[in-house]
Amino acid sequence: MADSIPGEHSHPRGGASHPVQGALRHLWDRSAAAGIPAHPLPGELPLRRWVPQGTHSLVDYAVGLGVAGAGCLSSEPSARRAGVALGLGLAGLSLLTDTRLSLSRLVPIELHALADYGWGLAALAAPFVGGYARRAPGVAAVQVVAGAALLVASLLTDYRCTSGMHLGRERMTDLGPVGA
């Protein structure tokens, strides 16, 4: 039997674990190790906590970059401006939110959740309010689908923060005694 390589983790069924699987395991983790649960928003949002936070973060980046990319490809100036502003705004907010997949943890997760709902509504309305729904139907379709998808994902996300920062409250890393 060959000696194991230092730093290599063995898989329970034998052999080495796949490095990508280990690195991306937190994308679907909904256990206590995934982070500190966000406080429910008024009206008990989200409705269900089915979508793990890591997966939602990837959805945020993909939707933001997709909407920005569709806007960049448009020849209609108002559609281009709206697409780039909406897309980069969502991706930028995600980069600053208190999650595992962010660069900086400046935005509390509850504020990010509220912004997700607002962004989804703004993306749904932008083609019609901006007046380019008929002049740039491709961009309008991308924005409407992205807005609806993000609203649904937001209603089903298990929002969790990593540092304990909560909206309107001090940092909470200890949620209280267990079993008391």
Image (cartoon, helix red, strand yellow):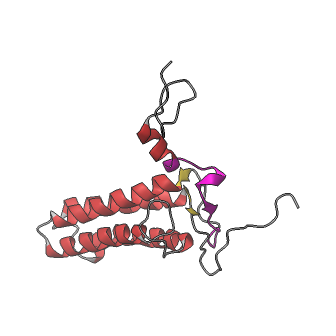
**Residue 126, percent from left and from top:** 31, 72
**Residue 47, percent from left and from top:** 60, 59
User: Residue 162 occupies which quadrant of the picture?
Assistant: bottom right
**Residue 82, percent from left and from top:** 25, 74
Pick whichever, 25 or 115, lies toward us. 25
Pick whichever, 26 or 94, lies toward us. 26
> Is residue 149 visible from the viewing direction of this image?
no
> Is residue 154 visible from the viewing direction of this image?
yes
Most extreme residue toward the right, as rendered? 180
Is 103 located above or below residue 25 in the figure?
below
**Residue 25, percent from left and from top:** 50, 44
Start-end of magenta stretch: 26-43
Q: What type of secondary structure mainly makes up the magenta span?
A: loop
Is 146 located above or below residue 165 in the figure?
above
Residue drawn at (48%, 76%) of the image:
106
User: Residue 108 occupies which quadrant of the picture?
Assistant: bottom right
Q: Is 171 displayed left or right of 130 in the figure?
A: right
Residue drawn at (47%, 52%) of the image:
55
User: Residue 96 occupies which quadrant of the picture?
Assistant: bottom left
Pick whichever, 167 or 149, lies toward us. 167
Residue 142 within the magenta-colored segment of the rendering: no
